[in-house]
Every structure is written in structure tokens, then in C-alpha cells.
Image (cartoon, grey):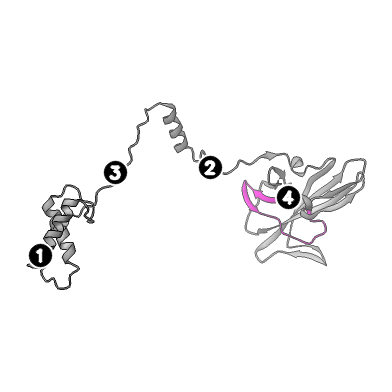
Amino acid sequence: MKKRLIVTAAVMALALTGCGSGPNLDDVSRSMEAEYMAGTLLKYDKNNDDMLDYDRSVLRATPTPEPTRTPVPFGSPAASAASQNSSDPGAASDTPAVNYVAAEQVYAMNQVDIKQMSNEIKSTYGSADAAISAHKGKELLIVHFRIKNKSSVSQKVNLMKKELQYTLTADGETVGSPLMTILRNDLQYFKEKMAPGRSSEAVLVFETDKKQTLQNMSIQVTNGKMTGEIAIH
């Protein structure tokens, strides 16, 4: 009985000072608050055998208010912009647009002409000291190019320094990148001092699936800023 009087006095003191540490309750009577506080104090007393039985339905957390939204009048500029952004998947895209130009602009070499000449399919390609063989179920697509110095003076042609990237496409779909080879005439690593009017041959070698039918093929060449397309015939 003495214990209950002490608890009751503590509850009354908390109610008068407003310093209670219980949960934030809304629309709860003072009597229910007193029952809750008394039960909370007594439940940690191991000698207490008759804990108060109070209505736990009062322990409702105060709902978090939702932010109010100012309605946008239909037909206003703001509403039109919001509608356009929600319906256009690319409106908020950070992917930069591809800058397509002529392949000559990507190579950017004055009086040096690079032209695609022909293509062929083989299982192996190269010389005895630098041969390439296709893996099982694969074949090699060799695309031949001609590089010509059209000027009247000698020129150093160094395509390796330009760090160009090539991508094979067929019917608008990406097929893959050329193989890294040690061929002396690999277009990716072509480096030569060319006399006036001189021409040299170069190749790009791709490994493709035998079961894949490649039609309307082209090669995209990019320097990181611009992309040019070279039709394969």
C-alpha cells in the first residue's frame, strides 16, 4: 500500500510540473495518463506482484503531419512543364547526346584519306608470326581499309596516338569491338611516315558468331567527343 502511495504521488507531481517522460499522447484523459505512468514505474520493480492493468489502446503515436501541397491550376505554365517532364522519359536524363559527324572529322587529318575498301570472313588471318584464329563457333570478320597521303609532302600518320574507338553494328544493333592484335597493319595502331601520294593497307578484325546473320553493317568510330559512321561493303 505504501508503494502505491509513492507511485501515486510521483504521478501527481509529474502531472503538475508537466515534465513527464512518457510518449506523446493525444486525446487521452488525465486518468489514463496516470494509469500509464504508474504502470511504467511499477513494471521495473521486481517485488511488485500486482501490476496495474491499463488500457494499452491509449498508446497511439501522434501522427506525423503530411506536407501540404499547393495545387497547380490546370493549364498554367507550371502544370504544362510538369506534364511534359512526366511524359518524356528523356527530359531528366543526364546522358549526353551523341554528336554524329563525318568520319573524316573524327580522324581530323589534313590530306590523309582513310577509306573502307572490302571485307571478308575467315577462320584464321595473319602471317605465321602474327596469326589470329577464331574460337569454336566463331568466325573472323576482316574489314579492309586504304590509307592514302594525298598531299605533296611526307606526313606522319599516327592513329594510335588519337586513341580512337571502333564499334561494329549490324541492322542498327551493336555487335562488338575489334580484336586487339599484333598485326602490323591493324588500323587501331597504325603508325607510319607516308611519302607523297603513298597508300597503305590496314584492317580491323572482329570476331562474330557463326550463327549470327550480319546485314547492313557499319563501323562507328569515335574520339570521345564526336562519332562518325563508316559503311561496310
Tag 2: amino acid = Ser
User: How far across and down, in percent of the image, does residue 9 sit?
Assistant: 12, 59
The magenta stretch spans residue 169:
yes
Q: Secondary structure at mark 4?
A: loop
Eye-nearest disc, 1 or 4: 1
Q: Which residues are magenta?
A: 165-187
The magenta stretch spans residue 122:
no
1 or 3: tag closer to the N-terminus: 1
User: Alpha-carbon neighbours of circle 4 within 10 Å: few (<14), some, or many (≥20)?
Assistant: some
Residue position for label 3 = 65
Q: Nearer the viewer, residue 71 or 6?
A: 6
Task: Find the distance from the CA under tag 4 to the CA under tag 3.
Answer: 57 Å
Q: Is residue 42 left or right of residue 201?
A: left
4 or 3: tag closer to the N-terminus: 3
* Residue displayed at 88% across by 41% down: 150
Q: Residue furthest left?
A: 1
Task: Find the distance from the CA under tag 4 to the CA under tag 2.
Answer: 26 Å
Q: Any mark on residue 164, and which?
A: 4
Q: Is residue 55 visible?
A: no
Eye-nearest disc, 1 or 3: 1
Residue position for label 1 = 4
Q: Residue 10 lies in what quarter of the image?
A: bottom left
Q: Is residue 226 left or right of residue 156?
A: left
Tag 1: amino acid = Arg
User: Alpha-carbon neighbours of circle 3 within 10 Å: few (<14), some, or many (≥20)?
Assistant: few
Q: Is residue 60 left or right of residue 74?
A: left
Residue position for label 2 = 93
Task: Find the distance from the CA under tag 2 to the CA under tag 1.
Answer: 67 Å
